[in-house]
Every structure is written in structure tokens, then in C-alpha cells.
Amino acid sequence: MVHFIGAGPGAPDLITVRGQRLLMEADVIIYAGSLVNPQLLEMKKEGCTVYNSAVMTLEQVLEVMKEAESKGLTTVRLHTGDPCLYGAIREQMDALDELGIVYDDCPGVSSFSGAAAALNLEYTLPGISQSVIITRMAGRTPVPERESIASFAAHQATMVLFLSTGLLEALQQELIAGGYSEDTPAAIVYKATWPEEETYRCTVGTLSDTAKEHHITKTALMIIGNAVAQGNYRRSDLYNPSFSTEFREAVKTE
Ligand code: SAH
């Protein structure tokens, strides 16, 4: 059987308890070497074989899984963050379906959660934004036309951009063309939760310059929107004394 596992954003203790157990029990580990923290591999059991998928094709990954399965071994496929975001898991799962190999998926802490933690941010501040748009600039992987940054920008919601660190000048232009003002709060989080984590608060108009100034060219997330400033929000109703919930009666005021 194959277990797809989210490794978390970087810090080795941010893998889930379940993910850690499966990792410790694996006979074969195939990890995404470009972003998964290699420290996680230290918990492998003796005799476990490790492959770095950064230097492998899909076909080679599948070959390793097939071989392991034929010997009755358990494979862990370790993806960065949560596998459900930009993880290229569907193509592996479809191939495993064809091969009749059983698999499951263990979620992980995505880097967009790690980045929020690095900045102590709440993405969904009442009165500011109640939505998070997770997207990317089109690079070698195209993004459907109807999902242009400018069209998303029109919502003025909180936006988190993956895989776009090399395209910040264009990103900045598209955000502004779509309706964010230049002084909209923004942040760049480099290697969230790793020891070398760096965080920079800036504005939409200074995104590209901020990255250049600090030599950030990859492994970063850009966060856009008024939620980054964490000001001018309204307090939550859930914890408001005058508001009744399923669990708590409102406090009566005269
Ligand atoms: N499945 C992963 C995303 C993989 S795509 C997740 O859930 O996080 C790879 C992109 O994720 C990188 O280009 C970068 O934009 C972002 N990323 C991954 N780890 C990161 C980290 N620790 N800090 C900031 N960005 C990160």
C-alpha cells in the first residue's frame, strides 16, 4: 500500500502524529527533496529505502511503488505542506488505480498555514475579509484564463500566492490592474517554519522591490490584503457577550 503524506511546511515537528507514525513504519520513502525537510527522514526505520523524487520522473516514482508493492512493502510518498495543493498527486493516484495498488492520503500543515503562523495572522478577519484565495501566477504551468490574478483581485479578499516568487513585478501589476491599491498591505514569507524563515511586511506596490532587496527568489508565499495589517476589524460575534450561540446564552444588558 502507498500512503501519501503531507510533511508540513518545514519544521519537522509540524508533521501530523499520523504522518509521523506512517513515516516510521515505511519500508520505502519517496520524498519531494526540493522542499521536504530532510530531517524528517531521520525517523525512518532500519532497512528503509529512501528516494528523492526531485530527480525522478513520474514513471520512475511509479516504478518504485510498483516494485515495493510486488514485495508486499509499504511505501510513503512524502509531499511538502499538504498534498492537496500543487502536489501532483492526482496523476500518481490515477496510475495506482490502474495498477490496482491501494493508497490513502494523510493531510499535512500547508505552507499557507505556516506563513500565517509566522506573521501571527488571521486571514479571515471579520469586517475585513471572510475569504482566502489561494492561487499562483501562470508560469510553465498555465492557469486557466478565468482565474486571472486581476479577476481575483477584484474581490479584495485575502490572497495567498504560491509558486510566484520569480514573477513579482508582473504579479504586482496584475494586482493593481485588478483593483488593489498600491498601498494595500502585503507580506512575503520565505521558508515559513524553517530555521531560516524570513518575513517581510510591505505593500502591493513594493512587493517586487522588497523581494529584490532581500534576495528572495523562491520558496516564498506572498500574502495580500487588508487582513495583513490586522487593523480596523470588528470583533467576532462568537465571543461577544451580547450574542447567543448554540453553547452560550447572551448576557442580558439593561
Ligand atoms: N503542497 C505545498 C505546496 C507545494 S507548491 C503546501 O501545501 O504548502 C511549492 C510552493 O509552495 C513553493 O514555490 C512556495 O511558494 C510554497 N512553499 C512551500 N513551502 C513553503 C514554506 N515553508 N514557506 C513559504 N512558502 C512555501
Image (cartoon, rainbow, N blue to C red):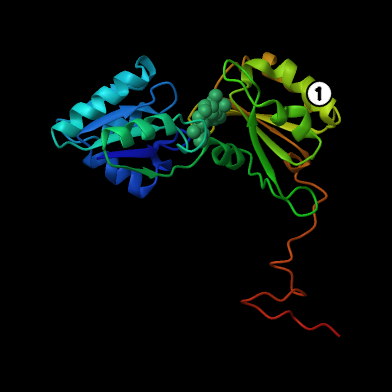
Question: Residue 100, image x and y in percent?
Answer: 26, 37
Quadrant in which the N terminus is drawn: top left
The image quarter in which residue 46 lies: top left
Question: Residue 26, image x and y in percent?
Answer: 23, 37
In the depicted view, which residue is nearer to us: 186 or 98?
A: 98
Q: Position of 209 compared to 180: left or right?
A: left
Q: Position of 169 compared to 45: left or right?
A: right
Is residue 203 something one can see in this rendering?
Answer: no
The image quarter in which residue 121 lies: top right
Q: Residue furthest front?
A: 98
Quadrant in which the C terminus is drawn: bottom right
For the residue carrying disc 1, how many other residues have a C-alpha within 10 Å: few (<14), some (14-19), or many (20+)?
many
Give the residue at mark 1. 205
Question: Residue 188, image x and y in percent?
Answer: 66, 28
Is residue 3 something one can see in this rendering?
Answer: yes
Q: Residue at x 25, y 29 (%)?
A: 65
Relative to 211, is 226 above or below? below
Which secondary structure lies at badge 1?
helix
Residue kind at label 1, given as amino acid type: Gly
Q: Residue at x 65, y 78 (%)?
A: 248
In the depicted view, which residue is nearer to us: 35 or 54?
A: 54
Q: Residue at x 79, y 48 (%)?
A: 128
